[in-house]
Image (cartoon, rainbow, N blue to C red):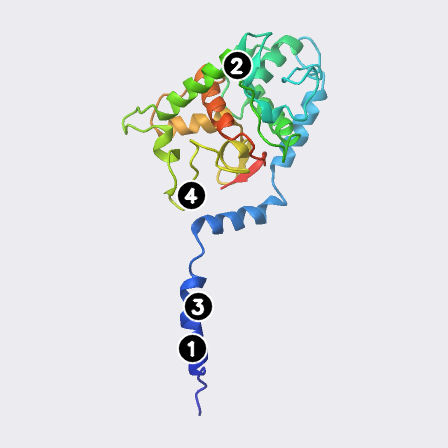
Amino acid sequence: MKRSHLPLWAAALMLACAPALAQKTASQGIDEYRAMLQDGNPSELFEAKGEGLWKQKRGPKNASLEKCDLGKGPGVVKGAFVELPRFFADTGRVQDLESRLLTCMETLQGFSAAEIAKTGFGKGEQSNVTALATWIAAESKDMRFNLPQSHSQEKVFYEVGKRLFFQRGGPHDFSCASCHGEDGKRIRLQDLPNLTRNPGDGIGFAAWPAYRVSNGQMWGMQQRLNDCYRQQRFPYPGFGSDATIALGVYLGVNSKGSASIAPAIKR
């Protein structure tokens, strides 16, 4: 019986092409995986829940959140997400989306902002805050970040956030910059964006809230920053603390001009 052989030229071509075929990076593979999941992104369920919560009369005052001012006037949602965190005159504070929602839930609906802040992620009213943030973020999808820096407190928070980003601590002497302070870093199979400058559309700050496939949870930015501190083996910051908001200002201002893809999907 005769054996069939590839012509020498075909074999040579396959050998020549083999390195190129094998050069797909881990990040490309992860991007393809996310693209396959995107059509069925479970964040859509949280969006629907968040929209319902925004319009539903709830709390001790039996009121909706439709008069909540997220920075563009009472009830205006579209475009608000990409301009947060920012300074709010009524609270005298710089607030991010989640801490601002706590203010509205307290003043309009009568909930206790302090009690919600102490509730664990994914539980009770805390899970409702995440759903609300998911829907509000979706209303600004594909819009570009443009955080205000006109108020003195906004400028202070940027500088504080920058210092916190580079502050080393914990048993491993880590900082945010240990992972996200320069180009070309990777952890396990995932490339780590450089967040000291504009990382580009849909990267870093421009991708959260996001659905985490690995644990089946929807995460807002507060939980994402909390997990960064966990990985540093550092004490958890308080929900909506000045520290986490300052980090949000630093990351958000650095993302100026980047398009938001939130709510995104993550590994």
- Which structural element holds mark 2? strand
On the rendered structure, is 81 left or right of 25? right
> Quick one: 16 or 138, which is closer to the camera?
16
Marks 3 & 4, CB-CB < 8 Å contact: no
Residue 11: which numbered mark, if any? 1
CA gap between label 1 and label 4 equals 34 Å
Residue 169: which numbered mark, if any? none
Vertical placement of 67 versus 143: above or below?
Answer: above
Three-letter amino acid code of the residue under disc 4: Asp
Q: Tell me the residue that label 2 is attached to.
A: 94
Residue depicted at x 55% and y 14%: 87
Residue depicted at x 66% and y 12%: 59
Q: Residue furthest bottom?
A: 1
In percent of width and height, residue 133 lies at 60, 25
- Which of marks 2 and 3 precedes in the sequence? 3
Please rate how many residues cluster around mark 3, counting C-alpha atoms within 10 Å: few if below 14, some from 14 to 19, many from 20.
Answer: few
In percent of width and height, residue 132 lies at 62, 24
Q: Is residue 107 visible?
A: yes
Three-letter amino acid code of the residue under disc 2: Val
In percent of width and height, residue 205 lies at 51, 31
Vertical placement of 38 versus 117: above or below?
Answer: below
Q: Tell me the residue that label 3 is attached to.
A: 17
Q: Quadrant of the N terminus?
A: bottom left
- Which of marks 2 and 1 precedes in the sequence? 1
- Which structural element holds mark 4? strand
CA gap between label 3 and label 4 equals 25 Å
CA gap between label 4 and label 2 equals 31 Å
> Quick one: 39 or 207, which is closer to the camera?
207
Three-letter amino acid code of the residue under disc 3: Cys
